[in-house]
Structure formats: C-alpha cells, structure tokens
Image: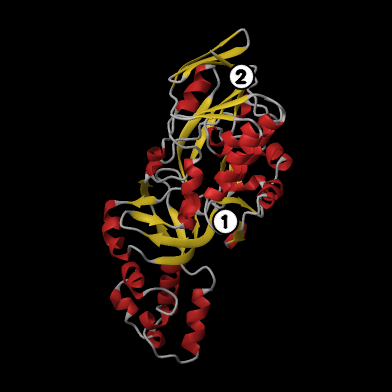
Amino acid sequence: MIKTDVLIIGAGAAGLMCAIEAGKRGRKVIVLDHANKAGKKILMSGGGRCNFTNYTVEPSNYLSNNPHFCKSALSRYTQWDFLALISRYRIPYHEREYGRLFCNDSASDILTMLLTECENAGVTIQLNTTINHIEQLEQLFHLNTSAGDFIAESLVVATGGLSIPKMGATPFGYKIAEQFGINVLPTRAGLVPLTLQPEDKEKFSTLSGIAVLCTVSNVNGQSFTENLLFTHRGLSGPSVLQISSYWHAGDPISINLLPQIMLSDELKTKRQQKINSTLKTILSHYLPKHLLSCLMPENLLNISLQDCSDRQIQQITEQLQHWVIKPNGTEGYRTAEITLGGVDCNELSSKTMASKKVAGLYFIGEVIDVSGWLGGYNFQWAWSSAWCAGQIV
C-alpha cells in the first residue's frame, strides 16, 4: 500500500502542470498513467512543434455550457506566466498567425521542461499503470492498480478527452465523474475536419490538396477567416477546424472564398474599364481554375466580361462569396484535436477545479466542459486549470 498526499490520473499537459505546482508546495505527488510515455499529445501537437499558448487569450476563445467558468483560471495563470516559465528554460519559440506560439525546435522542449520541473518538485511519475478500482473511504481515495494499491487525500483527474484514440484517449475521466455522482455533459468531436454528402464528395474530390483563404460561417453567424483545405473526404484547414466546434449535424455552413474583396464591385469596375477577357480568365487571378469549374457552369465561365449582365455578376458573386454547403458529418474523434462537452463546470469550483460534491476530488484540463479555439488555447486551459488545482490539492 503506497500512501501519498496527491494522486493525479493522467501524465499529459494538465496532469504534469498540476503535479509541479502541488510538489512545489511540499505535497507528496504521484502521477499515474496507462501510457508508456508521459506527454504523448504534447509531442505530436503543432506538427511536432507544440503550439503551447497564444499571445491573446480571452474567455471568448472558449466554448462551454458555462461560459463564465474559465475566467477565473485564465486570469490567475495567464499566457505570460507560462511564457515566463519557458524563458527560464531558454526555450526558443516563434509567433505564427493570430498570435500562435510554437517551439522553434521541437515539442520535446516543452515536455522536457515539465518533466524537469516535476523532478525538481519531487514528483513520482508511474507509467504503464492500469487503474482497476477507485473508492473513497474515510475521506481518503483508495486506488487499486496494476502497479499496486495507492491511498491519497486528494485525487486529480487529468485524463483528457476522447480525441485521437490511437494516442490512448479513453472515457475514463468521465466514468470517474459519473461514479461519484458528478454530471457529465454529452461529448462530441471538436476542431475536426468536416465530411461531405456523397454527391458533393464526388464533385469536389478532384480538388484534394487545394487550399484557399476564406471566411467560413455557421448559421448563428460565428465565422473564421483562415485557410480552407479540400481533402479526399471533405473540408479541412484551420477555418473549417474552427467552425467545426460550432457546427451541429444537419446545419449548413456558408463559405466566402474571396473575403478580401467585394467581387461584384470588382467585376463591374473591370467591365467599365472595357477589359475583354472571359470570366474564367479574370476569376483565375483570385481562385484556382479547377475550383471555379467545380463551382460554376463552364458556359458561364466562358462568357466575356463585356457580355456579362449585372444579374450574371450577382450570380457569380453569390456562388463565390456566399457558397452554402451542408456537411455530412465530421471525421470524428479519430482526427479531432479536442473533445467538446465533458465534466459539467457547474459541478466544480472555478477557482480550484474541486468537485462541489466530493471533498478532495478535482478535474482539470480537457476532461472538463471547456474547449478552446485552434491556436494554443487548449494548452493554455490545461496550464491554467492545472495551476489553480495545484495551489490547493
């Protein structure tokens, strides 16, 4: 029987961060994980460069059934606090579009930093460990595992969501919550490519690999302007991943393929200038010809701009700047970057991440119903929520 102060289930971003903070307070901390390596998702994130936070972090960058819940944690441990930690380790990083911060060299720089901090704080990390049973007796948590039995005053669930099951994602954290009578909201895949209806998939399959800057909007007016990528299964790219978290089955999405110009005015101006090219020639300065051919009939594309009526210009504008398409679904957890839904925020303290029902039980990171946009926001939620719990466990 191994007795400790704090048991943390999950050796990912949130679990390691919480362990560091609790260890720094002199608490005896053991982290348990079923994987053979800590921080696997850290290593694969951001194409191996780890988009570890963002210069601009606001509550509005997060989805939750309780939109106010994330405010406390994000304000108490900010992106600047994490950047201060990064700078202590002299990890080189760079900014990409929209304030996204990535390692210059490798995501392993972040993981090495976290593991070094754990070691300095006296944290024990126990890998390859299956948890068979959890119960609370006399305000102590008893865990029966493949590595023996553990007892702790505080139990922290940092098991993540359901995204990317090949990396070991399971619903274990939700099952722990349900075991202790804590509400879990329905989950679904977020930041995930959208698939197309069979007829659309066939129509656009030849565009696979083509990327265009566009604005993608949902029925409620939420929109993102970034690249869209056509794939052999459907639509991907940052703009589509972002809108997928707001998309619901059966809803259409609207795509503006030319968000930086007023196409109708542009075409009418060129017509006044007596430009005598075909519409296809003119439009191909803005979009790939292959894409134009998929979206509009060839007989329209082959009309000279001089012969084009206002009505036809309006028709072209509608098709390219208000292209409405109804996705068939998403690619699911297999390729999703996050899981929407999870442990109900109303069951937890927004200051400490502690369960309001069960003394000594905490939930942090992605297992909670707080999901960030693409761009380092989910890592920042992991750091912030874990730091808050780490101050009290």
Q: Quadrant of residue 124?
A: top right
Q: Is residue 335 above or below residue 294?
A: above
For the residue carrying disc 2, how many other residues have a C-alpha within 10 Å: few (<14), some (14-19), or many (20+)? some
Write down the residue under mark 2: 4
Determine the residue positioned at 70% across, 41% down: 77
Residue 245 in sight in this render: no
Q: Specify the color scheme.
A: secondary structure
Return the residue nearer the eye: 318 or 89: 89
Residue 58 in sight in this render: yes
Image position, residue 297 (x, y; %): 30, 72
Image position, residue 361 (x, y; %): 61, 21
Q: Is residue 45 above or below residue 93?
A: above
The label number, if any, that marks residue 323 in the structure image: none
Q: Quadrant of residue 237?
A: bottom left
Q: Nearer the viewer, mark 2 or mark 1?
A: 2
Rounded to the nearest angstrom, the CA distance separating label 2 from label 1 is 36 Å
Image position, residue 229 (x, y; %): 41, 61
Task: Work out which quarter of the rendered image holds the C terminus and state it.
Answer: top right
Question: Horizontal placement of 63 versus 320: left or right?
Answer: right
Q: Secondary structure at mark 1?
A: strand
Determine the residue positioned at 61% across, 48% down: 61
Write down the residue under mark 1: 102
Three-letter code, disc 2: Thr
Three-letter code, disc 1: Phe
Image position, residue 388 (x, y; %): 69, 33
Q: Is residue 83 above or below residue 392?
A: below
Question: Horizontal placement of 235 versus 99: left or right?
Answer: left
Return the residue nearer the eye: 167 or 385: 167
Q: Earlier in the sequence, mark 2 or mark 1?
A: 2
